[in-house]
Image (cartoon, rainbow, N blue to C red):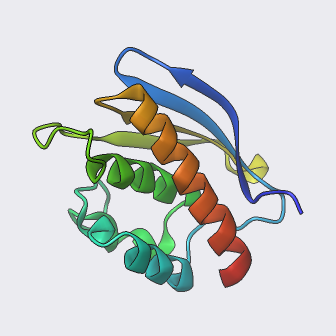
């Protein structure tokens, strides 16, 4: 079975990674409560990330009904933040935008302190989403 979330292209820039993400035709475009519960269990603290949105100041305010690429963004940020090579003083942030929602195409950008840590976090976040999207749908 084709993965629900895959990377079409990664650009490692001086200060961030820019990831062209594609959701498969069968994949939901937005998150749902089961996925959010699994993410909260696997990544304690994920839902209290700061997040600029129209509902509230935290990712948890929108997590139950946000885009899957937005969830990916926050997973990558979280995994970098808890990584032992990431200095405590580093502020991690990202953005997500749909390029073509009907086609499942989005751009996720996340800054980093270490590009290899960011790429590893992306790989781990993709694995989590692809496993859970099969289990929860």
Q: Position of residue 19 (x, y in %)?
A: 57, 34
Q: In the image shown, does 120 or 11 lie closer to the viewer?
A: 120
- In-image side of 74 versus 105 (left or right): left
Q: Quadrant of residue 74?
A: bottom left
Q: Position of residue 110 (x, y in %)?
A: 40, 36
- Image height of 73 relative to 131, above or below: above
- Image height of 77 relative to 34, above or below: above
Q: Quadrant of residue 118?
A: top left
Q: Residue furthest right?
A: 1
Quadrant where the N terminus sits is bottom right
- In-image side of 39 versus 78 (left or right): right
Q: Residue furthest front?
A: 84
Q: In the image shown, does 98 or 75 lie closer to the viewer?
A: 75
- In-image side of 2 versus 29 (left or right): right
Q: Position of residue 10 (x, y in %)?
A: 60, 28
Q: In the image shown, does 133 or 116 lie closer to the viewer?
A: 116
- In-image side of 115 versus 134 (left or right): left
Q: Which residue: 43% across, 49% down?
A: 76
Q: Which residue: 46% across, 46% down?
A: 121
Q: Quadrant of residue 63?
A: bottom left
- Image height of 134 relative to 21, above or below: below
């Amino acid at each position: 079975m084709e993965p629900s979330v895959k990377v079409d292209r990664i650009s490692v820039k001086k200060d961030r990674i820019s990831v062209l993400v594609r959701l498969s035709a069968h994949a939901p475009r937005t998150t749902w409560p089961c996925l959010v519960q699994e993410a909260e269990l696997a990544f304690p603290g994920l839902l209290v990330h700061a997040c600029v949105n129209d509902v509230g100041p935290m990712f948890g305010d929108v997590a139950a009904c946000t885009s899957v690429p937005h969830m990916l963004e926050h997973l990558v940020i979280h995994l970098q933040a808890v990584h032992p090579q990431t200095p405590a003083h580093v502020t991690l942030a990202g953005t997500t935008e749909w390029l073509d929602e009907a086609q499942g195409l989005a751009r996720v950008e996340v800054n980093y302190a270490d590009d290899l840590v960011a790429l590893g976090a992306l790989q781990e976040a993709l694995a989590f989403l692809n496993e859970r999207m099969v289990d929860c749908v």
